[in-house]
Image (cartoon, rainbow, N blue to C red):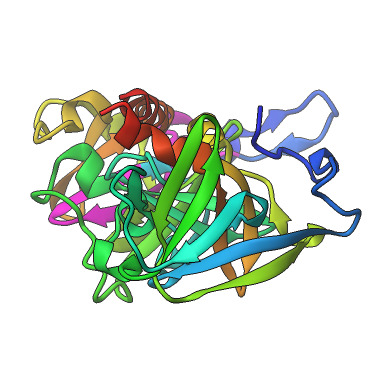
Amino acid sequence: MDDSSNLSITSAGTATRATRRDLQTEHLPLFGIRVGSISLLLDAHDVMAVTAMEPPTRVPGTPGHILGLVPHGDGALSIVDLAAFLGVNEGSSVDYGDVSSLRVVCVRVGELEAGLLCHQAIGVAQIRTDSLQSASVLRGGRLGEFVAFEVEFRGARVGMLKLKALLDAARSVSRRESDR
Amino acid sequence: MRLIQRREDVTGSNFQPRAIRNLLLVDVGQQTVGLPAEAIIEFTDDLDEEVPLVNLAEVLGLDPRLTDGRKARFQVTGGVLMLNIGSRYRMHDILLQELLFPPAFIRELMTSAVNFVFNHAGRIALHLDVEHLRLPRSTG
């Protein structure tokens, strides 16, 4: 069928053309990261930047998955060790003797900013919404708590993270441990 | 709240308009820590069994050997605290423009442990509350 059949008129009176495929399936821009052997996806809108890892400044009283602070823009960014927090990859992903291959994915949800330490920042992919499946496979560690959807991506089962829930939980753990 | 949220919060007799004067800066490995110099009683190499001893590197979760050696006695509320600071320390002024906004992510946590965050030689440094450092040992 000719795409012109999907021609529509906006309220401003201008014509826009949409293909039949666009109308049938929406795409989500998701940002892929790898933590150990597990690939995860984030809403690409929440990702501000990707940087190399540098030695963080430790903050007393914080749990092991809060690695510390690094300079970021005009302020300081908290670094979260995803592998340690999620309990995957058998603990911390950090070997302080060699951090050059690690990446920090800087994310923001509301007023919360954090740097998620991972082994690889894969980049942005457009994922079809009709390919998302309910979380059922990725269950290791705390993944079950923070994976919203799963999708087959580049031949592997990949989980989309509930980023706000993850950041809130990482902070809650921080507060509980600081009270001890 | 002790944590400085804005540069305008830097007020009081110990603070000057353009700088925070006479901080004790201690290098702990690759990290630098600020401590309140006005609370220092003396530097010493001797132990005092009647005074609680806290290792600064241990407070930060780092190798305690990083601050083995020299100690500083601090006046704290109700007594004295002895802090292992090692040999790499100096007095320093911090310019107000070096102060940084604390990250919201761990802001609540930092209020009890950290007075303020600042930029020092391209890295993040923390000014610690010596009253807080005493608590883990004194409360068991």
The reply to whether the magenta stretch includes residue A6 is: no
Q: Say which residue appears at 41% left-offset and 30% top-offset.
A: A171
Question: A160 or B105: which is nearer to us?
Answer: B105
The spot of residue A27 in percent (x, y) is 43, 39
Q: Is residue A48 left or right of residue A35?
A: right
Residue visible at 47% across and 42% down in the picture: B80
| Quadrant of res B3 | top right
Q: Determine if residue A19 is in view.
A: no
Quarter of the image with the C terminus of chain A is: top left
Q: Residue A16 at what x, y percent from top left?
A: 69, 38
The residue stretch that appears in magenta: A18-41
Instruction: Quarter of the image for the N terminus of chain A: give it.
Output: top left
Q: Is residue B31 above or below residue A172?
A: below
Q: Is residue A39 magenta?
A: yes
Above or below — where is A23 with respect to A51?
above
* A55 is higher (above) or lower (below) than B102: below
Q: x and y percent of residue A17 in the render?
A: 64, 40
State which quadrant residue A102 falls in: bottom left
What residue appears at the point 81 percent right and 35 percent down from the top-left corner? A14
Task: Report whether residue A105 is seen.
Answer: yes
Residue most extreme to the right: B17
Of B3 and A126, the residue lying toward us: B3
**Residue at 24% across, 75% down:** A97
Image coordinates for residue B96, horizontal then vertical, percent: 80, 57
User: A157 or B13: nearer the eye?
Assistant: B13
Of residue A1 and residue B16, the one placed in the foreground of this image is B16
Number of numbered discs present? 0
